Image (spheres, rainbow, N blue to C red):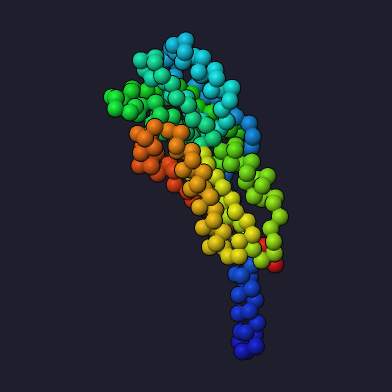
């Protein structure tokens, strides 16, 4: 092969590689904007638990979970988590953990899942409805200056953030993670210390970059 041909092929494949999407981030799993409630138990609810369940199901979006204390005294719910298991863990943590008292015995009563999924779905992960709105209506549609980078980050228990117009990919990632952690820290303040500790132990508060986009050309 002639040297000129070799140089041409090298330049061609170098350009092709340079044009590939940043870091090869694939699109996160999304399920649209409709939810369904799936019951997991036929346990009898107390009047207060029944009232709280009606309240939860009227407001919840996927992924969510509703957990009841077996003694009929307490309930806890989660919403907008990044998966069924995460939503269930969050609700169970809030139900069972009590400051300075024995742990409650709790059971999963119902889940909120995307309507697109079958009712017998055991586990699924993906963007919550709230994060999907941020991702599809802000992150993917917002204008980006030429030669800059944008990044999208999320924490499993339901917080997400984005950044745009960063000079480098690394700067975009750092800014998105920093913003995500700020949202997470504020959200954790709503929970008792024992719940915060358990959430951190299970790393449900961990922020991760799930997508990077660039406008280099």
Q: Nearer the viewer, residue 65 or 11?
A: 65
Direction from residue 66 to residue 18 in the image, left or right: right
Number of numbered tags placed on the structure image: 0
In the image shown, does 54 or 164 lie closer to the viewer? 164
Q: Residue at x 67, y 62 (%)?
A: 215
Provide residue 101's location: percent of width, then percent of height: 29, 25
Image quadrant occupied by the C terminus? bottom right
Residue 91 in sight: yes
User: As drawn, which residue projects farthest toward the bottom?
Assistant: 3
Decide if residue 29 is on the left or right side of residue 98. right
Q: Quadrant of residue 67?
A: top left
Q: Is residue 106 above or below residue 1?
A: above
In the rendered image, which quarter contains the N terminus? bottom right
Place of residue 125 in the rendered image (x, y in percent of width and height, measured from the top left):
51, 40
Residue 123 visible in the shown view = no
The foreground one among 48 and 125 is 48
**At x 53% / y 50%, what residue is drawn?**
179
In this view, 147 is above or below 94: below
| Residue found 35% across the figure and 42% down from its top | 201
* Residue at 48% from the left image edge and 38% from the top image edge: 187
Q: Is 172 displayed left or right of 203 in the figure?
A: right
Q: Residue furthest top?
A: 47
Q: Position of residue 15 (x, y in %)?
A: 64, 73
Q: Position of residue 149 (x, y in %)?
A: 62, 61
Q: Quadrant of residue 3?
A: bottom right
| Quadrant in the rendering for residue 163 | bottom right
């Amino acid at each position: 092969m002639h040297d000129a041909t070799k140089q041409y092929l090298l330049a061609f494949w170098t350009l092709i590689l340079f044009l590939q999407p940043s870091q090869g981030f694939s699109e996160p799993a999304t399920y649209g904007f409709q939810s369904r409630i799936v019951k997991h138990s036929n346990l009898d609810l107390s009047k207060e638990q029944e009232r709280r369940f009606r309240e939860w199901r009227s407001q919840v979006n996927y992924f969510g979970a509703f957990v009841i204390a077996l003694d009929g005294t307490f309930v806890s719910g989660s919403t907008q988590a990044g998966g069924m298991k995460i939503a269930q863990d969050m609700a169970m943590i809030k139900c069972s953990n009590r400051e300075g008292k024995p742990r409650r015995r709790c059971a999963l009563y119902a889940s909120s899942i995307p309507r697109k999924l079958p009712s017998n779905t055991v586990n699924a992960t993906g963007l919550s409805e709230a994060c999907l709105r941020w991702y599809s209506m802000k992150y993917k549609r917002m204008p980006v200056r030429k030669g800059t980078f944008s990044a999208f980050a999320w924490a499993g228990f339901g917080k997400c953030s984005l950044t745009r117009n960063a000079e480098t990919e690394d700067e975009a990632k750092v800014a998105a993670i920093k913003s995500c952690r700020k949202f997470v820290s504020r959200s954790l303040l709503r929970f008792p210390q024992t719940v915060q500790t358990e959430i951190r132990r299970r790393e449900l508060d961990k922020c991760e970059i799930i997508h990077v986009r660039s406008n280099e050309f």
